[in-house]
Amino acid sequence: MYTYSAYWQHSRLDFKDKTHPLFVGSCGTCRLYTVKKLPTHRPRGRLDYQLLYIASGKGHFYFNGKETVVSAGNMVIYHPKEEQRYYYYVSDHTEVYWVHFTGNDVKNILKKYGITKNTRIIYTGVSMEYKHLFLSMIQELELQKEDYEEMLIHYLMTLLINIHRVILSKPKKRNLLNMDKMDKAAQYFRSNYNKSISLEDYAHSHNMSVSWFIQNFKQYASTTPAQYIQTLRISNARTLLETTNYNITEISNLVGYENPLYFSRFFRKQCGMSPSQFRKKLEEQ
C-alpha cells in the first residue's frame, strides 16, 4: 500500500478548532497494491470534517447501515460526529485523496458552496486538478514553510469553489443517457490507456461525432478525453515507479509513451519533478 500524508503538528489526533473560520488539520492519499482490504470504521465519527476524493477505482461506503459503492469522479463528505464506515479493496484499484478540516464557520462556508448537512456524495468528475490541489495541501502541511496554514486554506477554498461549479452545472435528466455513454468511454480508456487510442475511431464506432463526444466527455469528467488518458498514464507511471524496479524507458513504454524523453518532460510538468526524482524521494521516505 502506498500512502502519503501530513498532519498539523505531526499529530494524528482529530480536534475541533474554534479560533479560525476554517483550518486544515491533516490530508493525504493512498493506493492499495498488496493489502487486499483496507477497512475504516469510526462509530462515533471525528471531531472535524472529512472530504474524500475517489480519483480512480471505487470505495464501499455505508450510510445508515446500507452499502453505497462510490466510483471514481465522486467525493464523499463526513460531518463531525457522524459514523464513518468504508472499505477499499485492492481488486478495485482504488486511489483516494482526503482532507480533514475544522473551524468556527465551516457550516456556513460549505453551505455557500452547495454542501449541506444532508450532503453525502458529491459528483465532481475525474480531474487532474483535484489531485494537484490535494497534493499541494499535503506538501504544504508536510514542509510547513512560512504562512503554510494560510496556503492550506487557499487550496481547500479553491477545491470547494471547483466543487460548487460542478454542482451548479450538474447534468439534467435528459443527459443521463449521454453520461452512461461517457462512463463506458472512461472504462474503455482505463482498460486501454497504454495503447494507441484514436478518439476519432472510438467516436465513430459508437455513432458519435468527435466534437459531440469531446464536449460531453468534458462535462462528464471535467477534462477532455485526451487529458483523461494522459492522467491515467501518469497515474499508472507513478504506480510503477513506486512498486517496481523497471527503468524509466521501460515504464515509459508500459504506460503508452514511445519516447522516454517526452514521457519524462510530461511527468515533470504534471508531478513537479522528473520520474527519477520522484523515485528517489520515495526511497528517502
Image: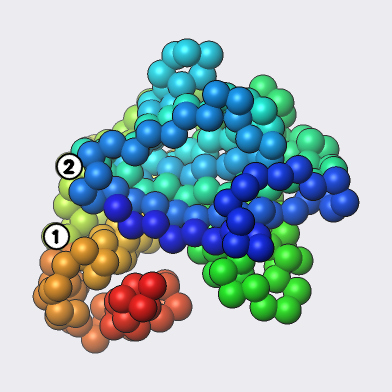
- Work out whether mark 1 precedes mark 2 in sequence or the reverse, and give the earlier one: 1
Residue at the (69%, 37%) spot, across then down = 47
- Where residue 168 sits in the image (x, y, percent)? 66, 37
Task: Indicate the amino acid at tag 2.
Answer: Ser
Q: Is residue 201 left or right of residue 148?
A: left
Front-lying residue, 232 or 208: 232
Q: Is residue 3 left or right of residue 115?
A: left
Tag 2: Cα neighbours inside 10 Å, few (<14), some, or many (≥20)?
Answer: few
Marks 1 and 2, how far apart in space? Answer: 17 Å
Front-lying residue, 108 or 167: 108
- Is mark 1 in CB contact (under 8 Å) with mark 2? no
Task: Indicate the amino acid at tag 1.
Answer: Lys
Asked if residue 228 is positioned above or below residue 52 in the image, the reply reads below
Helix, strand or loop for disc 2: helix
Q: Which mark is residue 205?
A: 2
Front-lying residue, 104 or 253: 104
Q: Is residue 33 left or right of residue 8?
A: left
Helix, strand or loop for disc 1: loop
Q: Is residue 131 visible?
A: no
Front-lying residue, 232 or 66: 66
Residue at the (84%, 49%) spot, across then down = 21
Q: Nearest to the eye among marks 1 and 2: give it.
A: 1
- Where residue 186 sits in the image (x, y, percent)? 30, 44
Residue at the (35%, 30%) spot, across then down = 180
Identity of the residue furthest to the right in this view:
19
Q: Is residue 45 visible?
A: yes
* Residue at which label 1 appears: 195
- Where residue 15 sits in the image (x, y, percent)? 71, 45
